[in-house]
Amino acid sequence: MSNSTFDFNVFIKESKDVLFNPKTYFSTMKTSGGIAEPLIKAIIYGVIAGVFGLIWSFLKLGGSGGGMLGGAIGIMSFIGPIIGAIIGLFIGGVIILILSSICKGNTDFEANVRVMAAVMVVMPISAFFGFASGINLYLGVIISLAINIFALWLIYNGLVEALKANPGTAKILGYVLAAIFVLFMLIGLGAKRAANKFINNFDNSDVKEILKDLEEK
């Protein structure tokens, strides 16, 4: 793909290659050509993720709420991933650049942004499985962890194959980041369990009594 014309068929093929054959894809990936192409990729991934977020919001799955703010939350479920994709592309590019620098790889910003755009193929996948946490908390955590580990695997291939980073150093960084992901996932799981326990133990009748007392006053 070039910046003058964006071929959607090529985009689909490249997305499949990243998912199913990352080593080959990153070894032949263009590391120059302008920022427009990776930006368009990121936006498309964000739109697809937003569609899934909107669907799960309407179905009240994956932690999306309803009530008075239900409509606003639903719209943000669509818009949020698009904004996040654009911001995440450049922030992620900086993070990958730092990792590549540590691993003595390519430190050209555009090249690192292009790697990040390719890795963002996991964004729609993560959004698709967003319903899992609405079905079962532990199922959602397991799926989220698996997707994050897979994203790290893609980053590793991007560093080694596209950015020519040192494989040994990149592997060590991958293990460190994986351990950090697991740690934060466990902390998040504990926080969610505590929140769910609080909500389940909170008797709705207590709320009604409080509202009744306020009305009487």
Image (tube, rainbow, N blue to C red):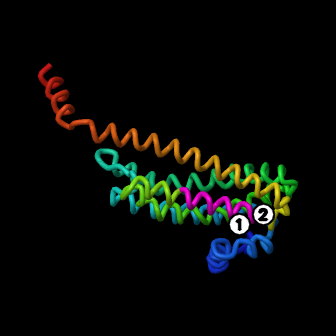
Q: In which quarter of the image is residue 1?
A: bottom right
Q: Name the residue under label 2.
A: 34
Name the residue rendered at 62%, 59% in the picture.
149
Name the residue type under label 1: Glu
Q: On screen, 211 above or below 166?
A: above
Residue at the far top in the pictured view: 217
How far, Cα to Cα, is label 1 from label 2? Answer: 7 Å
Name the residue type under label 2: Gly
Q: Name the residue under label 1.
A: 37
Residue at the far left in the pictured view: 216
Q: Position of residue 172 (x, y in %)?
A: 76, 53
* Callout 2 crowding tier (Cα within 10 Å): few <14, some 14–19, many ≥20: few
Name the residue rendered at 45%, 51% in the picture.
76
Q: In which quarter of the image is residue 168?
A: bottom right
Q: Is residue 191 magenta?
A: no
Which portion, as a residue range, is magenta?
145-158
Q: Nearer the viewer, residue 53 or 161?
A: 161
Q: Do the residues labelled 1 and 2 touch (CB within 8 Å)?
A: yes
